[in-house]
């Protein structure tokens, strides 16, 4: 079994953090030993790096001996950092056999980092032969895909998907469909892929055949993987933001300054979000990771108290089909009842869309009739930082 190590180029003083730092000149030797490694690049001049400290320390406590640190503000490390870290910090990258691999794009919090490390310790596709192996893998990750694929062509589909989504999800195969609860009742058993989301305790199912002879395509499987794995309330990253926009449903953004606040909001709003999972995309956002996004959503005006600080979450609805933004009123409680009532007000046209300063916009369809908008100016999603996406089609909005 492969082992992985997480090597961190951290930005804060070693004397404060007590991490096992390593210089760039020592990395070549370190990368060539003890299996795969995950290397994080930090620069003390970048505020976002400091924000990772507590999460990294927690992750380090769960993977003792697997974490190293290198400071990218040290000129001794310039060449290595420039070659592998990109233009911004922090950046975390996987190295396999001393060769650079994929860049970690998940949330900068402890559990997702540990899950990423664990995925690359497992086989690409785990072969499950006992109920205990099945149960252990089912809850080993936030989203786990387990398939019964009796033909070579079907197994090739699973293998291809596992390669494509290796950084994000865990995959397994069973030779005996009786290991999958409820899947051995058909005769002959139906080839199938199951997705289990641990955070939601939810399971989705995709038959691998449309009939007895036609396998699902790789595109069908990819669409299933991306939708079935989507958390009821996700933590926003650049990659999940792109998928959310491409999905076309209205996006509810909830900004909160601390990891604990965002986790608490996901818990308190989970039941509400479950009821709207098919028609809305709901995400929590770390404003330090997306510093320009609040302004694009009308959340950073000149009024006092607009800052997103601890204890003062903020939110907005982006109605993608009409390209309209509705900021959630500051000071209004961020709880299920208040959000649901505000959403009803938006749906019934009692709330006007946000207009950027200096722009005159008129609308003639603010009622619930969903007539096409007549506006002199739209707020383009192309202006959202870090994303350039053309949406070919839109779902009907529903609140």
Image (tube, grey):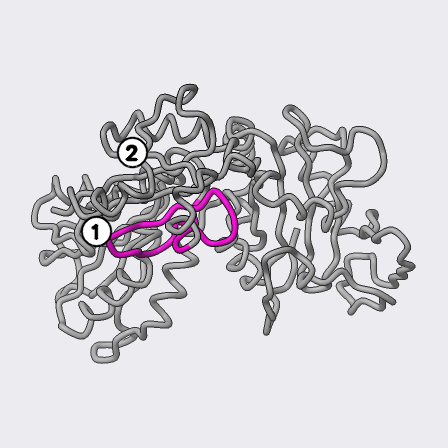
- Secondary structure category for the residue under label 2: strand
Residue 107 placement, left or right of 324: left
Q: Which residue is mark 1?
A: 182
- Secondary structure category for the residue under label 1: loop
Q: Residue 85 placed where, x, y %?
A: 43, 50
Q: Give residue 24's quadrant in the image.
A: top left
The residues colored magenta run: 83-106
Seen at 40% across and 51% down, the residue is 79
Tell me: residue 156, above or below residue 349: below
Seen at 51% across and 53% down, the residue is 87
Determine crowd level at label 1: few under 14, some 14-19, many 20+ residues with C-alpha closer than 10 A.
few
N-terminal label among 2 and 1: 2
Q: Which one is nearer the viewer's eye here, 106 or 391?
A: 106
Residue 35 among those drawn in magenta: no
Distance between mark 2 and mark 1 Cα atoms: 42 Å
Q: Which residue is mark 2?
A: 67
Q: Give residue 384's quadrant in the image.
A: bottom right
Residue 74 placement, left or right of 193: right
Q: Which one is nearer the viewer's eye here, 76 or 305?
A: 76
Tell me: residue 242, above or below residue 12: below
Q: Residue 368 placed where, x, y %?
A: 77, 57
Q: Residue furthest bottom?
A: 213
Residue 22 placement, left or right of 109: left
Q: Residue 134 placed where, x, y %?
A: 16, 45
Residue 109 placement, left or right of 303: left
Residue 105 among those drawn in magenta: yes
């Amino acid at each position: 079994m492969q082992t992985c190590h997480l090597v961190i180029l951290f930005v804060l003083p070693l004397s404060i953090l007590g991490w096992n730092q390593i210089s760039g000149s020592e990395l070549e030797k370190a990368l060539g030993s003890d299996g795969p490694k995950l290397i994080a690049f930090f620069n003390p001049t970048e505020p976002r790096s400091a924000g990772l400290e507590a999460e990294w320390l927690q992750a380090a406590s769960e993977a003792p001996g697997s974490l190293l640190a290198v400071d990218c503000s040290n000129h001794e490390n310039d060449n290595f950092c420039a070659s592998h870290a990109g233009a911004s910090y922090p950046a975390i990258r996987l190295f396999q056999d001393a060769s650079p691999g994929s860049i970690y794009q998940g949330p900068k919090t402890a559990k997702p980092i540990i899950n990423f490390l664990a995925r690359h310790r497992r086989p690409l596709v785990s072969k499950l032969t006992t109920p205990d192996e099945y149960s252990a893998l089912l809850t080993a990750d936030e989203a786990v895909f387990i398939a019964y694929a009796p033909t070579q062509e079907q197994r090739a589909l699973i293998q291809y998907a596992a390669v494509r989504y290796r950084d994000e999800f865990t995959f397994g195969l069973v030779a005996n469909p009786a290991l999958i609860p409820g899947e051995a009742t058909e005769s002959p058993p139906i080839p199938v892929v199951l997705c289990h989301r641990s955070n939601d305790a939810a399971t989705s199912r995709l038959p691998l055949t449309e009939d007895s002879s036609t396998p699902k395509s790789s595109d069908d499987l990819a669409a299933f993987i991306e939708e079935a794995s989507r958390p009821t309330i996700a933590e926003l990253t650049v990659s999940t933001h792109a998928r959310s926009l491409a999905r076309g449903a209205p996006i509810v953004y909830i900004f909160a300054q601390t990891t604990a606040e965002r986790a608490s909001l996901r818990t308190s709003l989970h039941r509400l979000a479950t009821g709207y999972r098919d028609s809305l995309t709901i995400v929590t956002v770390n404003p330090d990771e997306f510093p320009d996004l609040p302004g694009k959503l009308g959340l950073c005006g000149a009024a006092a108290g607009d800052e997103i600080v601890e204890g003062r979450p903020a939110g907005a609805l982006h109605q993608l089909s009409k390209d309209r933004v509705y900021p959630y009123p500051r000071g209004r409680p961020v709880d299920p009842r208040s959000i649901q009532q505000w959403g009803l007000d938006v749906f019934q046209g009692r709330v006007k869309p946000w207009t950027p300063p200096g722009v005159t916009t008129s609308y003639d369809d603010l009622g619930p009739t969903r007539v096409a908008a007549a506006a002199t100016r739209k707020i383009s999603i192309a202006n959202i930082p870090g994303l350039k996406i053309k949406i070919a089609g839109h779902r009907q909005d529903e609140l």
